[in-house]
Image (cartoon, grey):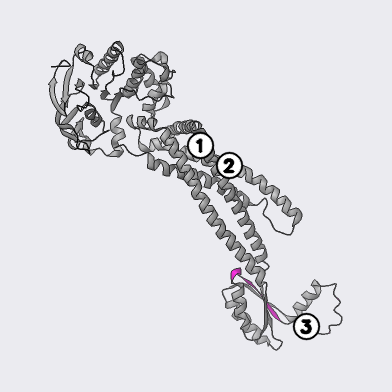
Amino acid sequence: MLLRDIGFFLTEAFISIRRSGLMAAISTATIGVSLIVFGIFLLISANISNISDFFSDKLEIRIFLKESISAGQISSMKHRLEAMPEFKSVTFVSKDKAWRDFRKGFQSLDLTDLVENPLPHSFKLTLKDNEQIVKTAKYVRGFENVEDVGYMGTIAERITKFAAYTRLAGFILVSLLTLATLLIVVNTIRLTVIARQDEITIMHLVGATVPFIRWPFIIEGALMGLAGSCASVAILSPLYGMFVVRIQEKMPYIPILQEDFRLTLIYLTLIIVGTSLGIFGSYISVSRTIKNPS
Amino acid sequence: MIRIKNVTKTYPNGYVALDNVNLHIGRNEFVYLVGQSGAGKSTLLNMLYKAETPSSGDIYIDNIPLSTISAKQIPFLRRSIGVIFQDYKLLPKRTVYENVAFALRVMHFSRARIRRQVTQVLELVGLQQKMYNMPSELSGGEQQRICIARAIVNNPPVLLADEPTGSLDPETSWEIMQLLSKINSRQTTVVVATHNKSIVDDIRKRVIQVDNGHVVRDEQLGMYNK
């Protein structure tokens, strides 16, 4: 394609869109609607993983040790835990430190009756992969000198499972929508190709190459995809803004994404996906309908 | 310029449109292809710009065998062969200028060069005043002139015409044939398939008569009938 052809192709694409009018509008709208659903899924998914990350930082396994444990045993257990690849960090919390932290955290409690520190020595462990928390907790429970193991099992499990389910559901939904949108684009472009069959015949006659004939249709698809995706972003972005305000009024403790580069990335993804859908759809269509003569 | 060697065309239904045809048309010749409908004239013309391919035998244009031209190369062959039709095959929603410029656009010419060549050719066919009209606003003869302008705007060495006067009245037909003669005199080989007896008899050129897929007569300065 030469630079001077681009102007010609663009003009041809615009002429074609104007002529196919309603069909082009329906295609553009379909791309737009599909991308809104796609975008909603991306926003939900990004927020869930954000919330999941937020809680993950607080997820930990606590190993409470028996009273009878010796300093040497503590040290060897620390080495053993540090050697395990599952853990991001291994911190020993002594009986005294635990007691100090406890009193600091609960200053309003009257603890004067307690003459002796009731808390045991413990290890505070954070994981590299939070999905492994249950398994790992059960595993360390079997260690010698372990009195008890505590972890935020149910919450951790629920968050990670929920994130996985939404990802799967979203993936299926988005795949189906993408396929449907693609089929609609393929059909729209095919109709415009059929409508312009006479022109294509003449182009063949005067010596136009197949790529030259195809380009305007591909640009037409790209323009429809671009328009549809920009429309979806124009609708989605303020809607999400309103949603954020509502959530923050009612549940200010939920860490929701706002003014984050991830949002920009999501909107950019929508525009790229939409435009690519338009290009790919029309490419499929023209490669089936516009071929070399004879 | 054009050499047709042992060309036979059999359609899938068994109909033999051309049977072992041999012809030679020299550079800058003007040739009438005459014969009844279904005699094989159009098949012959179509094969010259590879809209159809022979079942056997080969056609050489400028010594290049068309059988060696792949589907991808056909567009480049067509740029050196202008074709005009009985039904003009114009783009109805574009101006006269656009219709002619179209042929140069596909060759990636610059805007300035397109403008220059289109203006020149429209002057040659006498349509410079109607450049911005739509084809539907023009008469049949004028529409055929657009088609001719489009076919020759690139100065192809060969011009093929399939019944160019088939839809025109005698006077207009005569004007169109004069125009084709003029183009022929500008170093273009012209092949005209026609039914128009009076034209062939008035403007005397080489006449090749096809009947039932065979060349039955090839005569310099011939008449429509023997």
Where residue A232 sits: x, y (%)?
Answer: 59, 44
Answer with left or right where residue A288 lies relative to residue A95. left
The 10 Å Cα crowd at callout 1, few under 14, some 14 to 19, many 20 or more, is: some
Residue at the spot of label 2: A230
Residue at the spot of label 3: A118
**Does label 2 lie on the same chain as label 3?**
yes
Q: Is residue A65 above or below residue B115?
A: below
Report whether residue A278 is seen.
Answer: yes
Q: Residue at x 58, y 63 (%)?
A: A164
Q: CA distance from mark 1 to mark 3?
A: 76 Å
Q: Are marks 1 and 3 in contact (CB under 8 Å)?
A: no
Q: Which residues are magenta?
A: A109-131
Where residue B74 sits: x, y (%)?
Answer: 29, 35
* Between marks 2 and 1 in the image, the one whose residue lies nearer the viewer: 1
Mark identifier at residue A23: 1
**Does label 1 lie on the same chain as label 2?**
yes
Q: Is residue A247 above or below residue A191?
A: below
Chain ID, mark 1: A
Q: Earlier in the sequence, mark 1 or mark 3?
A: 1
Q: Residue at x 27, y 23 (%)?
A: B161
Amino acid type at mark 2: Cys
Amino acid type at mark 1: Met
Answer with left or right where residue B211 lies relative to residue B157. left
